[in-house]
Amino acid sequence: MRSLCFIATFLMIGTGFSQTSDNRPGGCTGCFSEPKSMLLFSGENGDLNLVTPSGTLTVPHLPNWAGQEATPLQAISPSGDRVAWRLRLMLNADLVKCDPSNKRWCDPQPRPIFKSVMGVYSVRDKSWKQYGDFCEVGSAVFSPDGNKIAFFAEQKCTVASRDDGLMILDLQTGEMAPVPCSGYKSIFWMSQLSWSPDGKFLAASGAYGQGGIFVIDLASGEIKTIAEGHDPSWSPKGDWIAYALTVECMIVHPDGTGARSVLEKEPKWMNDTLDKPIIWSPDGEKLLLNQRQIEGYRNRVIMVDVASGHAIRISKNGEYVLGWVPYSDK
């Protein structure tokens, strides 16, 4: 049974998760849980929340975290033991006076100095690790085995000398290497990235209305455009790639054939903008879709059965759902 969040919480010893007295996850407004699942949600003030049927864990911030001026996507590992997130850090936070109610405003004397890193939070160790030193870092995605992270990184900030592209971080060695492709310049840094279940390909997209959906061969760097749209999400079975097309959620086979709308049988759900990310259930049979009113900022999440096209609303005026992986409290 799904549960909505709030009510008083207590700490579950040894797990770091809080739980409400009536088994509703706490600390995450409008969130929900799914049986035998862990869900990743955005939260207020840039928080991230991991929600299970047993409760909620809020991922802590680093002391010199400078807020997120933009919204590249966070990622949860396939086993739910790690979260990857672009962290924007202020290097001279001890010298710069900032308004605590608005992290985007700081006294320009001295001028704040920032860097971006790929941050990886360990749920088990309750600690962050930082990788790289970039001008900017974009959306992240874990490999199917959880040992690597693909993300977009910008090395230099000057218009005259840009050096950006897709990177792959090996979590076992800490080493990073660029994806060997020549057409990645058109990939939008904040769009959803998705790894094929066999680990051989990445799906990416250009900026909204530009470039379409790309499939990148990680061995050769070859790029193939398979559809018009943005924010692709590869199904766990490997047979479909879901993506956004304004208010529609489309699915297409990885070879570019069979494109169709998953909401064509219930068009009443296509009145609002489809926001990133698009999330598959671990069994590949359902999709969670974040929808935002075209006029306004209220968000709702709907669940769609891909085979039947039947959709139901899961939450209203709550947080964005960012990931869905299997979970066991054993």
Image (cartoon, rainbow, N blue to C red):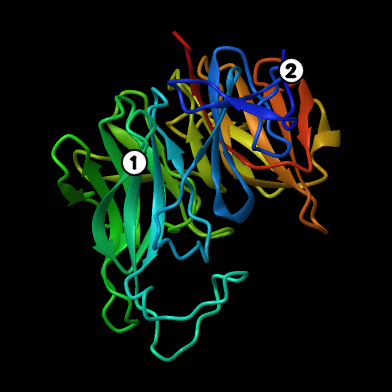
Q: Nearer the viewer, residue 257 or 177?
A: 177
- Image spot of residue 41 (x, y percent): 58, 38
Circle 1: residue type: Ser
Indicate which disc residue 77 carries.
Answer: none
The residue at 63%/18% (across/down) is 34
Circle 1 SS class: strand
Q: Is residue 92 above or below residue 32?
A: below
Direction from residue 49 to residue 206 in the image, left or right: left
Direction from residue 168 to residue 88 in the image, left or right: right
Circle 2: residue type: Asp
Q: Which residue is mark 1?
A: 127
The residue at 26%/79% (across/down) is 161
Q: Examine the image and state in which quarter residue 219 appears.
A: top left
Q: Is residue 131 above or below residue 263?
A: below
Q: Which residue is mark 2?
A: 22
Q: Is residue 151 above or below residue 238?
A: below
Does residue 262 appear anywhere in the picture?
A: no
The residue at 48%/20% (across/down) is 13
